[in-house]
Every structure is written in structure tokens, then in C-alpha cells.
């Protein structure tokens, strides 16, 4: 039987960090956990698949072996791995997940306590804002305790009752063959309470949808697709679990003058043909105002001038990229009679020795000569 790629199984890139792998695993393990999918063979298989992928990719040595040799490089049933079918296996994985998050409270605790989902917010910013950094306000949907019932979900003046099925534990024990496993209570879905008289505003949820405004600090140097994490600003957790994180992903708008390439910037630098021939000085825009560039005599189109340190600051360090100006020699337009006259005169006195004044044309003619013999 051919196996699925471990990275695909976890839905992460091959260069994913340990942290990303752990996160992907947590998400999938919770989704396919047998407690949440009772009697689903498919979920059980998925759960095992995910767990196996995590066991390999979370171990530096095994991951390296897998990267190099694929499935042949790692045998999850070999020493160290917990194979087998028993539910003990699930419990182990489960306490792995929650032991991690709640500092060891998992395993025997309430398995219906979930961390909220991470959320993503796409933010468009200008190149200038990305280069200098900025502070932005964003408005995102959120949940907040209902002000009528103060979060209880019960109509004011009434109290939620203890769930009769689980006696308030949120979990019930179910026997399956020789095993007895804990499952989330089907009546109260883990809250341990039952609301007989729901609040009219939140209909028993205890929370209402609202919006919150957050300040986001964008550090100087961010690039397309960079992520800024706002810890705990994601979706609220369930039954007292911690909130997820909010990731603000930056998208840089196209700039009319500059193209960005990592920390470097590129721009076109149009110069007149006279300046190109005689040399001179031109002013060009940079992110911090105008800068002067000395143009050498006999400059051709396509030549690059590098302005050191006029690029974008590194988002992590303190160094700056460069600004690369690409020369474009312009053909003059809208000429007056006098200008045309001078150009005709120029052309006439250059007639005898065109090759000397036009290096490209000369090399072009030379190639043609070679070609025709
Ligand atoms: Zn309410
Ligand atoms: Zn219950």
C-alpha cells in the first residue's frame, strides 16, 4: 500500500518550521480525534495517519531521514514508536496535545476544552508603509459575553441546570468491548450544563457576535506574505480553552516607480540622449526623497547605477538593501525646427565615421559581415 507523503498529511510545506508542524498536527489531531468522531473508522484511520506523520516530522533525525529517503528511510513501527490498535494509543496522543497546551492538565481533564482557531487577516499596505513600518487599525469579527445573561446563556432570573446525562462532568463513559472510554456528553456537548430557559438575545449561546478594533504594528521591512502574530486575538476557545492567534498577512501594493526584490529596489532612470553622451547629473526619487546620480559620459541604455543603502531595511537586522537604477536613454520628441536643424547638422558631420560613434551599430555590422563571409 502506498503511503501519503507526511508533509501532505499534515498539510504543511517541506520547509515548515517545527512550530508549524506542531500546530498543523494539533489541529488535525483534534479534528479527527476518536472522541469527537465516535464509531468512525475513517476518522480513526486519519488520526493514526496524522499521528504517524507527526512522530516522524517532529523528530529532527527522523525528519532528515525521511527528507532524504522518503518512507523507506523511516519505519514508524520500528523501535520507539507506539504501534498497535488500542485506545490507550489515543489517550497518549491526546495527553500529548493537551499536556502541551495546558501544562499537563490534559489526559484526565475535560477533553471538550478546545483552543480557539487561529485566524488570518489579509492586509494591503503600500511599499512606503512596508519600508518604514506603520501602525494600522483593523476591525475583525469577534464574540463577546452576552450583556443580557452575562455569558450564562440562561434567561435572566433563571439558572442553567446541571446536565442530567453526565451529572455536570461534561463527559460520559462508554464501554466498547473490553475498553471503557470517555466521550463528550451528547446532551450538553461538554459544558456540563443544560439551559432550559434560554436567553432571548443569545439564544442560549452565552455569547454574541460583535466586532473589535485592534492596533497592528507593522515592522519596517515586511515583505509580501509576511505574517504578524497577534497572540490570543484569534477565535475564542471552547469551554474555557485559550483563544487562538490572529495572523495578519501583509500584501504589498504595486508601486508606480519602484519594483521590489527582497531588500533591493529597482527603478527606471530615463535620461536625455545629450546627458547620456556628455555625462551629467540627474535627480531620481528614492524612498527618502530625491537623490542625485552622476551619469558618466557615453552611458548606454540598460546601464545600472547602484545607490547603496537606498533600498529596504531588513525586517530582522539593521542593514539596508540597495536601489538599482536602470538607465533608459530617451529619444527626444516634440522637437522645434531649430532643434531638428541642429540634429541634422550633427548627423551630417558624423556621417563619415558612424562606426566610431555608435558602438552597438558597429558590432552589429561586424556580425553581419561575419555571417555573409
Ligand atoms: Zn444571553
Ligand atoms: Zn452533559
Image (cartoon, rainbow, N blue to C red):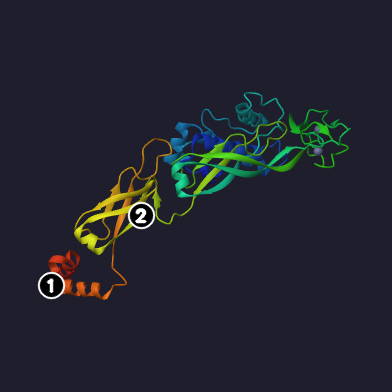
Residue 53 screen position, x and y as percent? 54, 38
Mark 1 surroundings: few (<14), some (14-19) or many (≥20) residues within 10 A: few
Question: Which residue ends up furthest to the front in the rendered image?
Answer: 338
Q: Which of 164 and 143 lies nearest the eye of the viewer?
A: 143
Residue 184's disc number: none
Query: At 38% from the left edge and 35% from the top edge, which residue is drawn?
Result: 318
User: Disc 1 or disc 2, which is closer to the eye?
Assistant: 1
Q: Quadrant of residue 22?
A: top right
Query: At 22% from the left edge and 58% from the top edge, which residue is drawn?
Result: 299
Question: Quarter for ligand 2?
Answer: top right
The C terminus is located in which quarter?
bottom left
Residue position for label 2: 267
Residue 290 screen position, x and y as percent? 35, 50
Left or right placement of residue 109 versus residue 328 in this view: right
Residue 53 visible to an observer of this rendering: no
Q: Quadrant of residue 145?
A: top right
Query: At 47% from the left edge and 47% from the top edge, which residue is drawn?
Result: 224
Circles 1 and 2: CB atoms closer than 8 Å: no
Left or right placement of residue 317 versus residue 12 in this view: left
Residue 236 visible to an observer of this rendering: yes
Left or right placement of residue 306 versus residue 172 in this view: left
Q: Which of 217 and 89 lies nearest the eye of the viewer?
A: 217
| Gap between marks 1 and 2 measured at Cα | 36 Å
Residue position for label 1: 349
Query: At 49% from the left edge and 31% from the top edge, which residue is drawn?
Result: 59
Residue 13 screen position, x and y as percent? 49, 44
Q: Quadrant of residue 30?
A: top right
Question: Which residue ends up furthest to the left in the rendered image?
Answer: 352
As helix, strand or loop, the secondary structure at mark 1 comes to helix
Amino acid at each position: 500500500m502506498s503511503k501519503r507523503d507526511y508533509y501532505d498529511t499534515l498539510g504543511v510545506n517541506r520547509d515548515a518550521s517545527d512550530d508549524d508542524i506542531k500546530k498543523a498536527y494539533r489541529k488535525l489531531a483534534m479534528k479527527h480525534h476518536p472522541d469527537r468522531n465516535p464509531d468512525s473508522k475513517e476518522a480513526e484511520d486519519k488520526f493514526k495517519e496524522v499521528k504517524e506523520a507527526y512522530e516522524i516530522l517532529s523528530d529532527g533525525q527522523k525528519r532528515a531521514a525521511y527528507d532524504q529517503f522518503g518512507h523507506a528511510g523511516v519505519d514508524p513501527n520500528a523501535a520507539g514508536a507506539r504501534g498497535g490498535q488500542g485506545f490507550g494509543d489515543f489517550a497518549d496522543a491526546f495527553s500529548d496535545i493537551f499536556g502541551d497546551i495546558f501544562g499537563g492538565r490534559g489526559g484526565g481533564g475535560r477533553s471538550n476544552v478546545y483552543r480557539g482557531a487561529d485566524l488570518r487577516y489579509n492586509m494591503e499596505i503600500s511599499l512606503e508603509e512596508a519600508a518604514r513600518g506603520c501602525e494600522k487599525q483593523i476591525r475583525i469579527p469577534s464574540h463577546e459575553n452576552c450583556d443580557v445573561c452575562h455569558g450564562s446563556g440562561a434567561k435572566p432570573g433563571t439558572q442553567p441546570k446541571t446536565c442530567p446525562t453526565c451529572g455536570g462532568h461534561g463527559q460520559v463513559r462508554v464501554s466498547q468491548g473490553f475498553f471503557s472510554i470517555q466521550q463528550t456528553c451528547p446532551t450538553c456537548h461538554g459544558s456540563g450544563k443544560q439551559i432550559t430557559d434560554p436567553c432571548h438575545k443569545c439564544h442560549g449561546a452565552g455569547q454574541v457576535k460583535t466586532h473589535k478594533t485592534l492596533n497592528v504594528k507593522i515592522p519596517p521591512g515586511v515583505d509580501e506574505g509576511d505574517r504578524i502574530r497577534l497572540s490570543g486575538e484569534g477565535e475564542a476557545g471552547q469551554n474555557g480553552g485559550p483563544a487562538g492567534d490572529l495572523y495578519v498577512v501583509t500584501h504589498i501594493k504595486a508601486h508606480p516607480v519602484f519594483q521590489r526584490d527582497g531588500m533591493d529596489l529597482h527603478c527606471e532612470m530615463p535620461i536625455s540622449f545629450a546627458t547620456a553622451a556628455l555625462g551629467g547629473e540627474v535627480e531620481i526619487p528614492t524612498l527618502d526623497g530625491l537623490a542625485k546620480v552622476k551619469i558618466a559620459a557615453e552611458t548606454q541604455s540598460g546601464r545600472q547605477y547602484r545607490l547603496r543603502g537606498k533600498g529596504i531595511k531588513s525586517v530582522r537586522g539593521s542593514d539596508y538593501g540597495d536601489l538599482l537604477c536602470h538607465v533608459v536613454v530617451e529619444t527626444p520628441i516634440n522637437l522645434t525646427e531649430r532643434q531638428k536643424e541642429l540634429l541634422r547638422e550633427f548627423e551630417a558631420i558624423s556621417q563619415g565615421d558612424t562606426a566610431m560613434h555608435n558602438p552597438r551599430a558597429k558590432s552589429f555590422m561586424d556580425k553581419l559581415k561575419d555571417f555573409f563571409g
